[in-house]
Amino acid sequence: MTRHLSALIAAFALLASSADAQTVRTGRLMQEKLLHSQRILAALTTSNYDLLQRETRGLIRITENPVWKELITPELRPFTGDFTKALADLAAASDRRDYDAAGASYTALTSACFACHKHVMNTRIARRNARP
């Protein structure tokens, strides 16, 4: 799980550090998203359901933020859909205190993040390579 978290953090850091990948506002939002995700992992590994619920709600609030809406382009809509579904599943598992379902939902959540960030990275690389 540590290797998975390291890969996730690296993907977020790569995207957050790229000036042409996002605005300052969306960069801040991604950093906030990363912090909530890290705290969710901490909550899962310590079976701290109060923290799990609080941080899951924090991620839900991010998806309600107008800046988040800026990120939902037609091209990224499938990725954000996967993210919000996994987040809803995580919230439900958290409310039920279902450790196994919460773990599976967290895995789906981070997979959705990773897939989206990989897509953005590959798109950015393709655009950079296409320049004369």
Image (cartoon, rainbow, N blue to C red):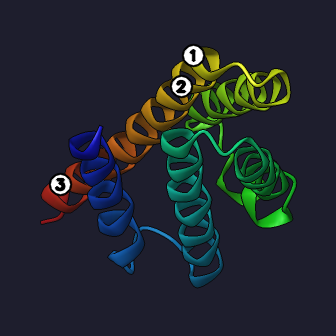
Measure the C-alpha gap from mark 1 to mark 3: 45 Å
Image coordinates of residue 111 in percent, x first then y, are 43, 31
The percent position of residue 67, horizontal first and vertical second, equals 76, 66
**In the picture provided, is 64 more to the left or to the right than 111?**
right
Callout 2: helix, strand or loop?
Answer: helix
Q: Are marks 1 and 2 in contact (CB under 8 Å)?
A: yes
Residue topped by disc 2? 103
Q: Amino acid at mark 1?
A: Asp
Between marks 1 and 3 in the image, the one whose residue lies nearer the viewer? 1
Q: Label 3's element?
A: helix
- Between 108 and 26, which is closer to the camera in this rendering? 108
- State the separation of the CA atoms marked 3 and 2: 40 Å
Nearest to the observer: residue 38 or residue 128: 38
Q: Residue 61 at x, y = what percent? A: 84, 56
For the point 48% across and 41% down, the residue is 45
Classify residue 45 as left or right of residue 120.
right
Name the residue type under label 2: Gly
> Would you call the spot at circle 3 few (<14 residues within 10 Å), some (14-19), or many (20 or more)?
few
Query: Disc number at residue 100?
Result: 1
How far apart are the alpha carbons under marks 1 and 2?
5 Å
Instruction: Compare marks 1 and 3 and give the one earlier in the sequence.
Output: 1
Residue under circle 3? 130
Whether 14 is drawn above or below 58: the answer is below
